[in-house]
Amino acid sequence: MPREITWTDSEEIGIQLQEKFPEVDPLTIRFTDLHSYVTALEGFTGDPNKSNEGILEAIQMAWHEEYVDSKL
């Protein structure tokens, strides 16, 4: 069973998003779509109503870091 993740687990979310969407450039994703991607992750237990722009930006940057690393 996957470990539970919430909005504050931006690094883990970034890793999981990179694994799930390896060809997607995270900087091209709208925050509304990013919100949907995160809430659909296996193990995500956060309240969908508790996200905000700062949280989504942190997740996007964590995902972007994983994306860049995967291209090296």
Image: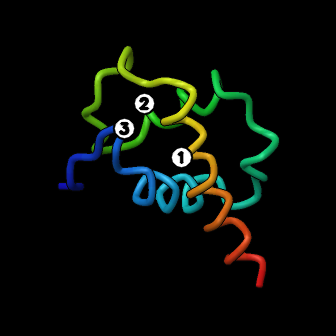
Task: State the quadrant of the C terminus.
Answer: bottom right
Q: Are marks 1 and 3 in contact (CB under 8 Å)?
A: yes
Mark 1 or 3 closer to N-term? 3
Q: Establish if 28 lies above or below 23.
A: above
Q: Dot 3 surroundings within 10 Å: few (below 14), some, or many (20 or more)?
A: many
Q: Secondary structure at mark 2?
A: helix
Identified by mark 1, the residue type is Ile
Q: Dot 1 surroundings within 10 Å: few (below 14), some, or many (20 or more)?
A: many
How far apart are labels 1 and 3 at the CA level? Answer: 8 Å
Residue 20 circle label: none
Kindly indicate the quadrant of the structure image that contains residue 50. Answer: top left
Residue that carries the numbered disc 1 in the rendered image: 59
Kindly indicate the quadrant of the structure image that contains residue 57. Answer: top right
Q: Nearer the viewer, residue 72 or 23?
A: 72
Residue that carries the numbered disc 2 in the rendered image: 39
Please state the total of marks drawn on the protein image: 3
Residue that carries the numbered disc 3 in the rendered image: 7
Residue at the far bottom: name it: 72
